[in-house]
């Protein structure tokens, strides 16, 4: 798994107004820019997040303050999207191999669609039967 690159760390003096936001004077450039923009110290639960995932792009338009939970969920969302993209690429590769070996993929898709229709019809029939049973019990 590839680790995310982090924003550049800068050193600030103990007398700096945002020293409390830092870790003993070490602070990410993005965090310092956001603290300066908001004109306040950031609390430890506040994460400065790069919208475009580029830690070198510290323009204020690219930065947003999130809670740890929000940042964690957003990171999870990105990992899931990346996994889906990899699966799509693998599926495309498999489809190409099947096609090259003479398997008609469109036929497979039609078969899958037909099975979904059968399942849907069976579900409608079950619901109808259940509603008929419910009606008959109401008259008993």
Image (cartoon, helix red, strand yellow):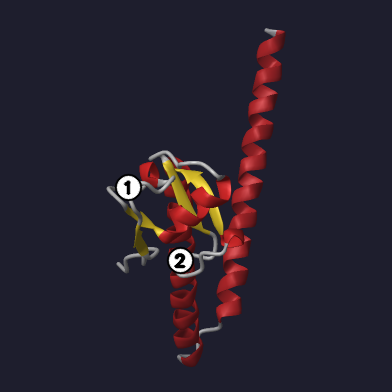
Q: CA distance from mark 1 to mark 2?
A: 41 Å
Q: Which residue is mark 1?
A: 14
20 above or below 111? above
User: In this view, which residue lies farthest toward the left?
Assistant: 24
Picture layout, residue 107 above or below residue 114? below
Residue wearing tag 2: 82
**Residue lying farthest top?**
140
Q: Assign a secondary structure to mark 1.
A: loop
Q: Residue at x 69, y 33 (%)?
A: 128
Q: Horizontally, is 112 left or right of 71 in the view?
A: right
42 w.r.t. 133: above or below? below
* Image coordinates for residue 47, horizontal then vertical, percent: 44, 48
Q: Is residue 77 visible?
A: no
**Residue positioned 58% across, 68% down in the render:** 111
Q: Could you tell me residue 137's position as x and y percent?
A: 65, 13
Residue 58 in the figure: left or right of residue 12: right
Please tell me which residue is depicted at 53% across the width and 65% down the height of the picture. 52
Rendered-image quadrant of the C terminus: top right
């Amino acid at each position: 798994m590839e680790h995310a690159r982090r924003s550049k760390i800068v050193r600030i003096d103990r007398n700096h107004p945002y020293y409390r936001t830092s870790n003993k004077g070490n602070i990410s450039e993005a965090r310092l820019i956001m603290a300066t923009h908001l004109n306040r110290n950031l609390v430890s639960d506040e994460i400065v997040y790069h919208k475009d995932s580029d830690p070198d792009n510290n323009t204020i338009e690219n930065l947003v303050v999130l809670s740890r939970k929000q940042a964690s969920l957003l990171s999870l969302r990105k990992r899931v999207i990346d996994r889906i993209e990899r699966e799509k690429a693998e599926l495309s590769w498999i489809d190409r191999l099947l096609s090259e070996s003479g398997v008609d993929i469109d036929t497979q898709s039609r078969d899958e669609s037909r099975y979904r229709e059968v399942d849907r019809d069976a579900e409608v029939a079950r619901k109808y039967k259940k509603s008929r049973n419910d009606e008959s019990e109401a008259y008993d």
